[in-house]
Image: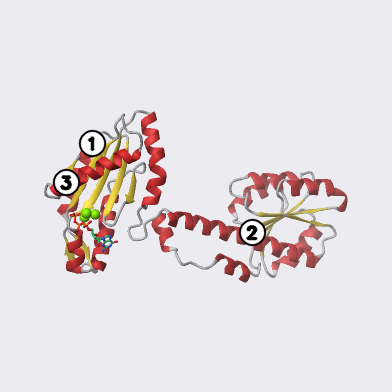
Amino acid sequence: SCALAARKIGGPDPLALAAADTGEGARILLVEDRPSAIDRIGTALAQKHTVTVETDPHRALVRAPEGEFDLAIVSLDLDGHDGLRLCSQLRSLERTRNMALIMIGETHEKARITRGLDFGVNDYLLRPIDRNELIARVRTQVRRRRFSETLRRALQTSMELAITDDLTGLHNRRYLDRNMGAIFGEAALQQKGLACLLLDIDRFKSINDTYGHEAGDEVLRAFAERIRQYVRPVDILARYGGEEIVMVVPGVELPDARAIAERIRERIEASPFAVRGGTLDIGVTVSVGVSVRRPTDSGPADILKRADDALYRAKSSGRNRVEA
Ligand code: GH3
Ligand code: MG
Ligand code: MG
Ligand code: MG
């Protein structure tokens, strides 16, 4: 999902979208059982919107989550039923809680209308319903609802982008820094293993020098993709530096951590990466520094430091090696 988010960068400006929204084309659920009101409201809204009528509130409650409605208009005095109760149920259900809600009531029902507004119904209309007022209030709620939906998506996208590395789609260092403390704390508390693998491509600079930076980028992406095949959902994979990837593996002690690192090292060495649309194969090797949590460690920085030291030893003793 992070890689997808990264591709969404540069999307439309949510504020501009909102300003351009005419509030038309909404999906509206009308819960009303008086034929004259159904006719009146339906006629007024059908030109600009899609209106679904439901006379029974129980069926309305079943249909509402399925229909992806922008708005529900609910009569408070349905025959033998409490429309206010339906509004409150729509507000509390996961799949309908963001729907816009407008109630229809009588002038003497002000107390119930106020209760509805109190628990989050957005607006109301009094009988007899004025056509233009109905259209205006519906438009306002539809636009408001769409705007908050657009903002919610934009916020989610930017939160994903903030923790994602653009080139590889892996998590970035910010994500690692924010989460390592909690992962370390969890492992320490449960007295479980926690391993850290620091993977660094060997002589990557010469790949850039020989084939160009673009080809280098492609190798990096393919390298990240291959390593991704070795992680479980609980592991963290993050781009740590330029061509360094860190893999955090909870619940694992040194022998298994070494085995994972060795398997990755072999798999990187075994097949070159195809770049430039498959016209060029570039073979690389990787050095891996491995470390595990020690009871004397005071924080994640201790584990990362030992992985870094081990990586340095792997490099200085010839590269294409795993050191711990
Ligand atoms: P070794 O690790 O084996 O010691 O040698 P190296 O050449 O891989 O190490 P060094 O850390 O000196 O160089 C890493 C190079 O990675 C330098 C930099 O130009 C390159 N690099 C870093 N980030 C990127 C990137 O995003 N794309 C490309 N194409 N190259 C990058
Ligand atoms: Mg280096
Ligand atoms: Mg390197
Ligand atoms: Mg490096």
Instruction: Tell me the kind of residue under disc 2.
Output: Arg
Q: Give the label, 1 or 2, closer to the camera.
A: 1
For disc 3, the marked residue is 314
Q: Which mark is residue 145?
A: 2
Q: In this view, does 209 lie to the left or right of 190?
A: left
Q: Quadrant of the N terminus?
A: bottom left
**Label 1: few (<14), some (14–19) or many (≥20) C-alpha neighbours in 10 Å:** few
Q: SS class of the residue under badge 2?
A: helix
Circle 2 Cα neighbour tier, 10 Å, few/some/many (<14 / 14–19 / ≥20): some
Front one among 196 and 156: 196
Q: Residue furthest left?
A: 318
**Quick one: SS at disc 3?**
helix
Q: Residue 256 carries which label?
A: 1
Question: Is residue 112 or residue 205 the one in the foreground?
Answer: 205
| Among the 4 quarters of the image, the one containing residue 5 | bottom left
Q: Is mark 2 within 8 Å of ligand 1?
A: no
Tell me the distance, in whole angstroms, between the alpha carbons under discs 1 and 3: 18 Å
